[in-house]
Image (cartoon, rainbow, N blue to C red):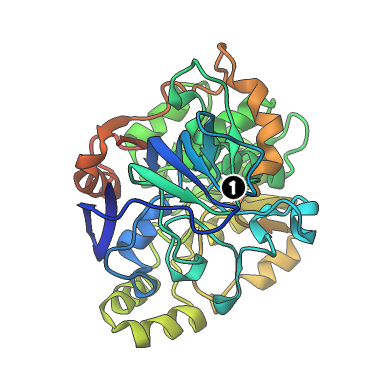
Amino acid sequence: MKAVTWHGKRDVRVEEVPDPTIQEPTDAIVKVTSTNICGSDLHLYEVLGAFMNAGDVLGHEAMGVVEEVGSEVTAIKPGDRVVIPFQMLCGSCFMCGEGLYSQCETTQVREYGSGAALFGYSKLYGEVPGGQAEYLRVPQAQFTHIKVPDGPADERYVYLSDVLPTAWQAVAYAGIPKGGTVAVLGLGPIGDMASRIAAHQGARVIGVDLVPERLERVRARGNEVLDLREHEKDLGDVIRDMTDGRGADSVIDAVGMEAHGSPVPKLAQTLVGLLPDAIAQPLMQNAGVDRLTAIYTAVDVVRRGGTVSLSGVYGGTADPMPMLQMFDKQIQLRMGQANVKRWVDDIMPLLDDEDVLGVDDFATHRVPLSEAAQAYETFQKKEDGAVKFVLKP
């Protein structure tokens, strides 16, 4: 089959790889009909190469049709249309019982102290072949799936794999008071969708980014936006002026380690990328290598007693946090990988023909799987209005 494979920093290729097969009785094989490039994939493209091997199959946002199931899989059958969550989860352990599916105890990658295994996402999360391919092996398939109806185009449902539940959790964790204000930092796929969800739930949204096309997408849906290029030095003051001098009730950091600014961590990321894996891996695991502009901004612009919700990915383990300011302002901080299936029942009613969240036209680019390498480059450079790529095998 054809699949998107990793071969080094900014080097992905579409290659022929072996077709996946049933390896465990809890497996399923899915023929992929749509698969996306996620902003988190760009971390592998740029920063986390120390935890990758040449030929690793990328991707964790896929949907398709079940081709084959293992002997212990009864919840789905060949011919079923399914979306595959980006994480593998058993549905029966303690953590799954708590709704903390991203911490599934059956698939945790204990070697690296990580939570549930993820598709196509490095040794840190299990090195499981991903979904940017023609076929996908799904471990723990009795629970690692979301059945969706036949009929509507894939784009009605494919974002259930990651974008929708990640954005939904970001809003839920933000704890926005009724009629309150949320500042969303970063208007890529997650920030854009979080803005839509928060506005749908009645919040006042202030979106912040420095890419004109992304700002316009959020403004076009009736939200307020601020161009970081114009307010990099005074963003906190501007948001306080917009909110009776207090700051936003809640802030969603949808940026993470790729934050604009922070030149010293940027240099650290670059140097790590040049080191041999044996040196780079422990450095990444034990050093502060994140660019923390976004989280420092979040702490600044949130009001006292407010909540900061982190959905952007951070990778360093010794990053300096503004603890004095966080403590003094009595800030609540919530974060973590999205617990995908926890939010599906809340989201599904919004995916009807009214399409209130605008999922049908959410993608900015729809390209064949064969053009994935160029798509990664365009997405990484934020060119051509790129916000979301859907790949078609």
- List x then y, in percent, for residue 111: 56, 78
Give the residue type that dot 1 points to. Ala
Say if residue 58 shows up in the picture. Answer: yes
Whether residue 98 sits left or right of residue 244 in the image: it is right
Classify 10 Å Cα crowding around label 1: few (below 14), some (14-19), many (20 and above): many
Relative height, residue 45 to residue 202 (above, below): below
Residue 255, image x, y percentages: 47, 52
Q: Position of residue 327 (x, y in %)?
A: 74, 67
300 shown above or below 372 = below
| 17 relative to 330 in the view: left or right | left
User: Quick one: which residue is furthest to the bottom in this view?
Assistant: 279
The location of residue 70, given as percent across then percent down, is 56, 48
The residue at the far front in this view is 71
Q: For mark 1, give the secondary structure.
A: loop
Compared with 207, 120 (above or below) is below
Q: Is residue 210 visible?
A: no
Foreground of the two, 375 or 135: 135
Residue name at image x 30 percent, y 36 percent: 393
Task: Find disc 1 in the rendering and name its residue.
Answer: 141
Q: In the rendered view, would you say 31 is above or below 54?
A: above
